[in-house]
Image: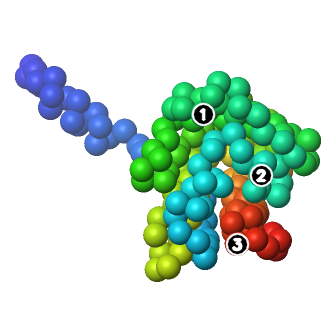
Amino acid sequence: MRLVAPTVFLALFALATPVTPVLAHGPTPQKVDQSVTIAAKPEAVWKVVGTFAAIDTWHPDVARSEAVDGNAAGGRRKVTLKNGGTLDEGLDEMNDKTFTYSYRLSDADLKALPVSSYSATLTVTPDGDGSKVEWLGRFYRGDTGNEPPEELSDAAGKTAMNAYFGNGLKGLKAKVEGGKAK
């Protein structure tokens, strides 16, 4: 009787085992990237947007925002939306020299946004005589199970995040340029 080496046996076993597709897939990260050009120097735009807890002064969907732990990296803000939902967000990094900050959602409130988690970065850069403001977010849908209801799906999350970022950038533009959010 001839013995087969263990590695040869494993290779033969792998070839003989049928391959079946994996049916469960869970959520995949989604991305939202919005930007707006503003007719003002980056320093002027940063004066408005660079105070982390002052989002209620320029975002039309925000009823109020309050600093929880200050405004340095590690700071927190509690944002109450006009729809009644709240966003508890923590500041990860802020750089006043490069006009950028990054933050993340701490606790999901599906009434506020149909997402289970997100992280975002807001950046102001020069653009000709004005500025470009970019708001980039990555998130997971509200229901992270394999078969989420439509209102907590990837599409619902993407629609809500695009609306939130888009409305915010319109409001910021209006605030800095002295007009109304459109």
Q: Is residue 96 left or right of residue 166?
A: left
Count how many numbered circles sit on residues in the image. Answer: 3
Instruction: Name the residue that disc number 2 marks.
Output: 57
Query: In the rendering, at what x and y percent does residue 134 appear?
Result: 55, 62
Question: Image height check: is 135 above or below 140?
Answer: below
Please tell me which residue is depicted at 91% across the width and 47% down the height of the picture. 83
Choose the circle earlier in sequence order: 3 or 1. Answer: 1
Query: In the rendering, at what x and y percent does residue 86 appear?
Result: 81, 37
Q: Secondary structure at mark 3?
A: helix
Please tell me which residue is depicted at 54% across the width and 50% down the height of the picture. 121
Dot 1, crowdedness within 10 Å: few (<14), some or many (≥20)? some
Instruction: Name the residue that disc number 3 marks.
Output: 177
Residue 106 showing in the rendered view: no
Per the model, the C-alpha gap separating discs 2 and 1 is 15 Å
Query: In the rendering, at what x and y percent does residue 38 appear?
Result: 61, 73
For badge 3, the amino acid type reads Glu
Instruction: Name the residue that disc number 1 marks.
Output: 71
Q: Secondary structure at mark 2?
A: helix
Tell me the quarter of the picture where residue 175 sits: bottom right
Residue 82 showing in the rendered view: yes
Dot 3, crowdedness within 10 Å: few (<14), some or many (≥20)? some
Q: Secondary structure at mark 1?
A: loop
Dot 2, crowdedness within 10 Å: few (<14), some or many (≥20)? some
